[in-house]
């Protein structure tokens, strides 16, 4: 059972620089302190180049911070090796990217199962049933065996969300998940995040440019030039 | 078991990648197949050719010949500290019998390394008919034993394979030279005062000019008396199971019997070195074809890694470790090698069938199962090795960069 008293994620004095040791060395994140609770539904906003994506990659253990510590489910991660980080990422974090990023060679259900396949090998009947249930939850039960290139952009993004949820992650990271979708589809996809946050109790951290989306979240974190300038609960959560 | 279950995932991803890049896969498979076909065909051809040459060479000679040791001058030992100056004339080697040849033969019969043992008495003679004469080599044989060394019945042209009681077998060229036919008489003169007139029981053709012009096969007893070596034999012919170890076996038997042992490898040194040179050139061909195949696989996979950069990023973000990515690409290399070799072996079988059926038919090329298995194994290994560099590059891609790759 997850310990509800604990944060999913805690960043302390986290810094990230690029081109270390070169003349064009550049610090992108300047000492970030941040906590995300078990059931938070937070938006990360900020102008282009503010470091949102870098922060998301560091949180998702795809990128290593230059200094500072990142605690995921209470575990410090800076000393972990690639295998350890991959294993933790595999079960603790679900990713949704702007451009859905599905594997074109695999059917929708195989894409959803991919994180399980990578962690455990051949999926059993339970895993397949779980994947079908998730596809049904995003409204795509009919498209389980369809290849991604035969699905619309919104449908592909929903497959990607189902994939992110298959490992029952504690934290769902989404990098402009609706940035590439029309308004109507964007609202549907956003609705899914909201629903999974409530139903599965997974924390959501959502990077967005869209002020309507961020205001629909419970909390808005504003990143400007690599520093958090404001972090507040929204006045009227829907 | 768990490891194997996890490998299933890498295998599945690799196969999906291969199927998605169908055109590329087909092209490199064809490349590998052509390479493997060349390797298998050339190897089988050379193997067949060499086997044929060796068979022809050894068909008319023993693998090892045991001879009595050379006679040397025994010097009177001098007291130590004395300087001895010797002027020595080497001794002429007369025809001598092998001491205790019956016991030696009995002992050799027990050695599992040898497949046949045949004592022979042989020496020079003149064959005379009327006023024509030819120098010949008399060979007194025990037909049953000798047949295991040289299967004379395969070489008979006329008459019967029969020696003893005044019967002799002669070669075709000798028969032509002296105008002899089966049933004719032939006088053999050996310098000792016991000439003999023999009846030509059969005429053989071994296919070697020298032998067909000179060999006269007699019964062991008659040859012994003609050569004035009653009860003796001058050579023991041996056959071994593995012909390429004949020289080491010869050395062992020489130590065992203190006789002089000559293996076919020694007496056919030129042939052996020619065969070795041929094998070397075959190996060169195999190595260079394998090299070019492996570079082909490596370059196709390198392109594939670039094409799949984003998918590698996705896999990494969805929980794939570096090792898993590495394995996905190594498996692709192995599949290229394995399937390509299966295809290539099929092609080379077809080529060999055509060669054996419609070719010059100078010799038959067998295809050994070992060669097939070996080339499949070699091709698969080559695939894995060739995939190593691109696989490492794929595994070391930074997932952040990879996933943003357009």
Image (cartoon, rainbow, N blue to C red):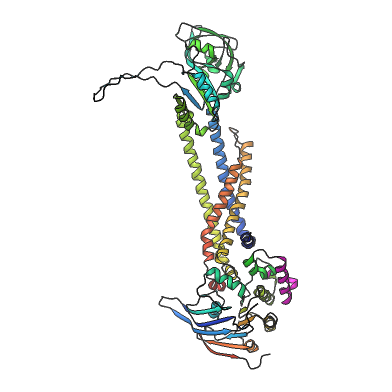
Residue B118 lies in quadrant: top right
- Please tell me which residue is depicted at 51% across the width and 42% down the height of the picture: B282
Determine the main secondary structure of the stretch shown in magenta.
helix
Q: Which residue appears farthest toward the bottom when viewing the image?
A: A235
Position above or below: A143 against B384: below
- Tell me where residue A21 appears, x and y as whole percent: 41, 75
Position above or below: B52 against A37: above
- Tell me where residue B239 appears, x and y as whole percent: 54, 27
Position above or below: B268 against A54: above
- Can the viewer see residue A103? no
Magenta-tinted stretch: A122-148
- Can the viewer see residue B346? yes
Residue B328 belongs to magenta span: no
Residue B115 lies in quadrant: top right
**In this picture, residue B284 sits left or right of residue A190:** left
Residue A136 belongs to magenta span: yes
């Amino acid at each position: 059972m997850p310990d509800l008293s604990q944060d999913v994620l805690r960043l302390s004095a986290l810094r990230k620089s690029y081109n270390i040791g070169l003349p064009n060395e550049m610090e992108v994140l300047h000492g970030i302190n941040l906590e995300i609770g078990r059931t938070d539904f937070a938006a990360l906003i900020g102008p282009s180049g503010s470091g949102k994506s870098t922060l998301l990659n560091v949180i998702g253990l795809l990128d290593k911070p230059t200094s500072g510590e990142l605690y995921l489910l209470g575990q410090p991660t800076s000393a972990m090796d690639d295998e350890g980080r991959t294993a933790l990422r595999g079960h603790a974090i679900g990713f949704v990217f702007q451009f859905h990023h599905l594997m074109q060679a695999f059917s929708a259900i195989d894409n959803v199962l991919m994180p399980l396949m990578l962690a455990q090998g051949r999926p059993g009947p339970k895993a397949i049933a779980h994947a079908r249930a998730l596809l049904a939850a995003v409204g795509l039960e009919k498209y389980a065996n369809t290849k991604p290139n035969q699905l619309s952009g919104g449908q592909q993004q929903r497959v990607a969300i189902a994939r992110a949820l298959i490992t029952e992650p504690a934290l769902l990271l989404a990098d402009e998940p609706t940035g590439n979708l029309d308004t109507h589809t964007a609202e549907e996809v956003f609705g899914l995040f909201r629903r999974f946050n409530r139903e599965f109790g997974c924390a959501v951290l959502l990077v967005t440019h869209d002020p309507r989306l961020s205001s629909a979240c419970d909390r808005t974190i504003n990143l400007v030039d690599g520093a958090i300038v404001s972090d507040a609960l929204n006045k009227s959560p829907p | 078991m768990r490891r194997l279950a996890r490998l299933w995932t890498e295998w599945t991803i690799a196969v999906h990648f291969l199927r998605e890049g169908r055109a590329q896969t087909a092209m490199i498979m064809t490349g590998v197949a052509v390479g493997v076909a060349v390797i298998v065909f050339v190897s089988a051809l050379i193997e067949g050719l060499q086997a044929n040459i060796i068979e022809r060479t050894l068909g008319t000679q023993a693998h090892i010949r045991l001879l009595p040791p050379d006679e040397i001058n025994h010097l009177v030992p001098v007291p130590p500290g004395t300087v001895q100056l010797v002027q020595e004339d080497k001794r002429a080697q007369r025809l001598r019998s092998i001491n205790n040849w019956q016991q030696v033969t009995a002992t050799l019969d027990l050695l599992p390394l040898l497949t046949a043992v045949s004592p022979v008495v042989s020496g020079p003679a003149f064959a005379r008919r009327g006023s024509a004469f030819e120098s010949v080599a008399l060979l007194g044989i025990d037909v049953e034993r000798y047949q295991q060394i040289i299967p004379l019945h395969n070489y008979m042209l006329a008459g019967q394979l029969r020696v003893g009681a005044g019967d002799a077998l002669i070669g075709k060229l000798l028969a032509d030279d002296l105008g002899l036919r089966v049933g004719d008489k032939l006088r053999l003169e050996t310098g000792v005062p016991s000439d003999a007139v023999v009846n030509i029981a059969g005429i053989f053709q071994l296919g070697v000019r020298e032998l067909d012009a000179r060999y006269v096969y007699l019964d062991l007893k008659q040859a012994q008396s003609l050569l004035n070596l009653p009860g003796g034999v001058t050579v023991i012919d041996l056959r071994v199971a593995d012909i390429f170890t004949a020289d080491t076996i010869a050395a062992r038997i020489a130590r065992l019997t203190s006789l002089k042992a000559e293996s076919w490898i020694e007496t056919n040194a030129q042939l052996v070195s020619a065969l070795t040179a041929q094998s070397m050139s075959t190996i060169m061909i195999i190595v260079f074809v394998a090299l070019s195949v492996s570079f082909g696989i490596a370059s196709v996979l390198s392109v594939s890694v670039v094409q799949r950069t984003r998918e590698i990023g996705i896999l990494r973000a969805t929980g794939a470790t570096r090792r898993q990515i590495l394995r996905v690409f190594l498996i692709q290399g192995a599949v290229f090698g394995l399937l390509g070799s299966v295809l290539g072996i099929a092609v080379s079988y077809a080529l060999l069938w055509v060669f054996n059926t419609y070719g010059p038919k100078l010799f038959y090329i067998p295809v050994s199962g070992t060669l097939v298995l070996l080339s499949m194994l070699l091709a698969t290994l080559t695939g894995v090795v060739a995939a190593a560099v691109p696989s490492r590059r794929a595994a070391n891609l930074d997932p952040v960069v990879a996933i943003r790759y357009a």
